[in-house]
Image (cartoon, rainbow, N blue to C red):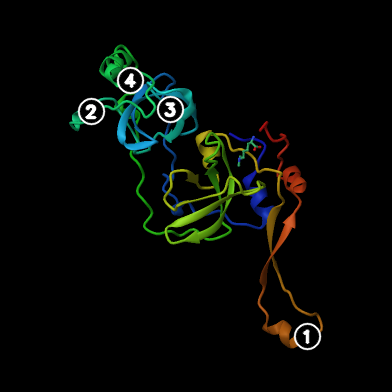
């Protein structure tokens, strides 16, 4: 839980709205995380989606699991939600008549795989089927609008979930922009991505919300009447216009109570 960032204050100060929870493929009540470090499970290899491998829980944060594929090194660790369809109890693959596969980048000779698999599972702690949760359904439509705020996974540093803004909408895709960062972390994803969350998600799950960056100023929306004070005709015709002004990052960081300096790079 992040004690140094206040969404309510931040939304007020930036004059922005949060994306409604119905926009997301996430459960309204986040799933409980009953996994423990060391438990083993089956996971789709992120680099080779058709193959199902054995993975070990090496870390836990909020409703997410940090996973390492057995037989792979630490350079391809990844995060999955406890209600992700990419993970399942050990035995699922076999029940479906399929074979567990060595991960991409399996360090030993493939001929050693059956023995490696046996030794990996023998006497290990398997995650019980009851702690896996059903994936929530896809919302029927992309209802995101440009400017809506959300919490989004930084794909380059997937441990981080950060305050973000919808920067674009195109068909069934949305452009995720990270508040206070230069744009190098921004990405397009499907509206039903499991990597994006409604405002308040981290607070509810006990995950860590990484505060906005201080690399670029944060845009502030204001409703202003832009017209000449002497032109009464025009004035009466004009409706309020949305004007983007820039709020100094330092001011936001101070008043939204973001006191921690950004972490090391
Ligand atoms: N040390 C890295 C971390 C950047 C993280 C950005 N995310 C949170 C959007 C850097 O400063 O480049």
Counting residues from the start of the chain, the first of labels 3 and 4 encountered is: 3
Residue at the spot of label 1: 231
Place of residue 207 in the rendered image (x, y in percent of width and height, measured from the top left): 53, 34
Label 3: state its secondary structure.
strand
How far apart are the alpha carbons under marks 2 and 3? Answer: 20 Å
How far apart are the alpha carbons under marks 1 and 2? Answer: 77 Å
Q: Nearer the viewer, mark 4 or mark 2?
A: 2
Q: Nearer the viewer, mark 3 or mark 4?
A: 3
Place of residue 127 in the rendered image (x, y in percent of width and height, measured from the top left): 34, 23
Counting residues from the start of the chain, the first of labels 2 and 3 encountered is: 3
Label 2: state its secondary structure.
loop
Label 4: state its secondary structure.
loop
Figure quadrant of the N terminus: top right
Place of residue 5 in the rendered image (x, y in percent of width and height, measured from the top left): 66, 40
How far apart are the alpha carbons under marks 4 and 1? Answer: 75 Å
Label 1: state its secondary structure.
loop
**In front here: 63 or 204?**
63
Residue at the spot of label 3: 67
Q: Which mark is residue 41?
A: none
Residue at x-position 66% and y-position 58%:
15
Count of numbered labels shown in the rendering: 4
Residue at x-position 72% and y-position 73%:
225
Ligand 1 position by quadrant: top right
- Report if the CB atoms under discs 1 and 3 are less than 8 Å apart: no
Residue at the spot of label 2: 99
Instruction: Say few, some or many: other residues with alpha carbon within 10 Å of mark 4 (under 14 / 14 to 19 / 20 or more).
Output: some
Residue at the spot of label 4: 126
Counting residues from the start of the chain, the first of labels 4 and 2 encountered is: 2
**In front here: 175 or 243?**
175
Q: Is ligand 1 within 8 Å of the beta carbon of the residue shown at mark 2?
A: no
How far apart are the alpha carbons under marks 4 and 2? Answer: 18 Å
Location of residue 210 by image quarter: top right
């Amino acid at each position: 839980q992040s004690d140094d960032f206040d969404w309510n204050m931040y939304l007020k100060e930036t004059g922005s709205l949060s994306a409604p929870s119905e926009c997301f493929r996430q459960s309204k009540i986040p799933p409980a995380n009953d996994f423990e470090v060391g438990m083993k499970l089956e996971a789709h290899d992120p680099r080779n989606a058709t193959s199902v491998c054995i993975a070990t829980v090496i870390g836990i944060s909020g409703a997410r699991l940090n996973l390492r594929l057995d037989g792979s090194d630490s350079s391809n660790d990844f995060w999955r939600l406890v209600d992700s369809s990419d993970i399942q109890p050990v035995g699922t693959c076999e029940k479906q008549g399929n074979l567990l596969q060595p991960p991409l980048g399996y360090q030993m000779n493939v001929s050693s795989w059956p023995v490696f698999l046996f030794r990996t599972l023998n006497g290990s702690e398997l995650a019980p089927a009851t702690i896996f949760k059903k994936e929530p359904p896809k919302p029927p439509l992309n209802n995101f609008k440009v400017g809506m705020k959300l919490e989004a996974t930084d794909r380059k540093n997937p441990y981080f979930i950060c305050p973000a803004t919808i920067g674009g909408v195109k068909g069934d895709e949305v452009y995720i922009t990270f508040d206070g960062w230069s744009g190098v972390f921004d990405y397009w994803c499907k509206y039903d991505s499991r990597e994006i969350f409604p405002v308040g998600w981290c607070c509810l799950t006990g995950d860590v919300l990484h505060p906005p960056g201080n690399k670029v100023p944060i845009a502030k929306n204001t409703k202003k009447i832009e017209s000449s004070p002497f032109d009464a005709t025009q004035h009466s015709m004009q409706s309020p216009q949305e004007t983007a002004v820039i709020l100094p990052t330092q001011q936001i960081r101070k008043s939204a109570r973001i006191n921690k300096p950004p972490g090391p790079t």
